[in-house]
């Protein structure tokens, strides 16, 4: 009887340990823990990863455009990309570091292919393709940032941007970065569209 009792206790302990491990694995799939002990959700990690890669791409393509662009407006835009995105990228990497969120070290395959394609162009052809890429990229970035920040587009509060509220310190930090970044990104988009349209019109008239 004692032996049976001991076996029952041992079995219960094993089952309890297995349950704990299963719960821990389930938690790992949904969230990790940052350096301050705050939960980092998959959504937060994905947002940071996409934003870091996007920022690095803007800087690299901006440097390329500074060398290859023929149009003065395109060159000026490229310089703005390098300056503004270097600043916002450094700020985001600081947020990621504070919360132990891994930041990609290089571009993903999609952005590498874009860089290679642009590297094979020059002059007016490069200008048109680069600005087309910039319009698409900034439209996507504005959409992504708007998932983290609310923007007043009309009325007396036009231009006011507020981060989405969150009780999670990690999410709150990321949302604040998004709110800080959105106005500049929208300005980039407006400029990209303006320059893109002017190049298209000029090409059509020829």
Image: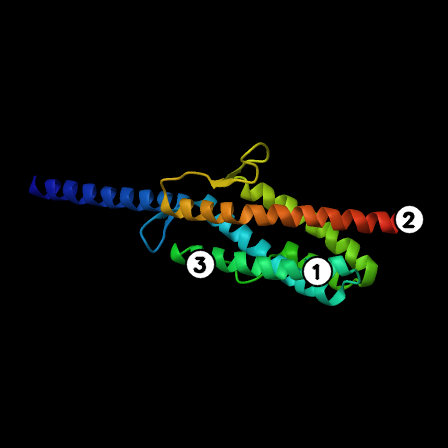
Q: Which residue was labeled with disc 2?
A: 205
The residue positioned 59% from the left and 35% from the top of the image is 153
How far apart are labels 3 and 2 at the CA level? Answer: 47 Å
Residue at the outermost right position: 206
For label 1, the SS is helix
For label 3, the SS is helix
Locate residue 108, reporting x and y percent: 60, 57
Q: Which residue was labeled with disc 1?
A: 76
Q: The N terminus appears in which quarter of the rendering? A: top left
The residue positioned 39% from the left and 48% from the top of the image is 170
How far apart are labels 1 and 3 at the CA level? Answer: 28 Å
- Closer to us: mark 1 or mark 3? 1
Q: Say whether residue 149 is left or right of residue 112.
A: left
How far apart are labels 2 and 1 at the CA level? Answer: 23 Å
- Closer to us: mark 3 or mark 2? 2
Q: Earlier in the sequence, mark 1 or mark 3?
A: 1
Q: Say whether residue 24 is left or right of residue 5.
A: right
The one nearer the camera, 205 or 41, is 205
Whether label 1 touches label 3, CB < 8 Å: no
Does the rendering let one see residue 117? Answer: no
State how the image is colored: rainbow
Locate residue 156, reporting x and y percent: 55, 33
The one nearer the camera, 130 or 72, is 72
Does the rendering let one see residue 39? Answer: yes
The one nearer the camera, 1 or 130, is 130
The residue positioned 73% from the left and 61% from the top of the image is 75
Q: Which residue was labeled with disc 3?
A: 94
Q: Earlier in the sequence, mark 3 or mark 2?
A: 3
Locate residue 44, reporting x and y percent: 46, 46
Looking at the image, residue 110 lies above or below residue 70: above
The residue positioned 82% from the left and 48% from the top of the image is 200
Residue at the outermost front position: 156
């Amino acid at each position: 009887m004692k032996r049976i009792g001991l076996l029952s206790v041992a079995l219960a302990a094993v089952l309890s340990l297995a349950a704990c491990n299963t719960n821990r694995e389930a938690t790992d799939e949904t969230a990790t823990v940052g350096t301050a002990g705050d939960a980092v959700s998959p959504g937060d990690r994905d947002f940071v990863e996409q934003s870091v890669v996007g920022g690095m791409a803007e800087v690299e393509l901006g440097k390329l455009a500074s060398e290859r662009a023929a149009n003065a407006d395109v060159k000026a835009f490229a310089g703005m990309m390098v300056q503004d995105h270097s600043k916002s990228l450094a700020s985001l990497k600081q947020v990621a570091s504070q919360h132990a969120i891994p930041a990609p070290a290089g571009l993903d395959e999609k952005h590498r292919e874009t860089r290679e394609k642009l590297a094979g162009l020059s002059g007016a052809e490069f200008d048109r393709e680069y600005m087309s890429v910039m319009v698409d990229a900034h439209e996507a970035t504005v959409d992504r940032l708007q998932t983290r920040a609310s923007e007043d587009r009309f009325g007396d509060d036009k231009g006011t941007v507020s981060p989405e509220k969150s009780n999670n310190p990690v999410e709150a930090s990321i949302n604040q970065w998004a709110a800080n970044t959105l106005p500049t990104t929208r300005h980039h988009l407006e400029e990209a569209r303006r320059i893109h349209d002017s190049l298209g019109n000029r090409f059509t008239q020829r």
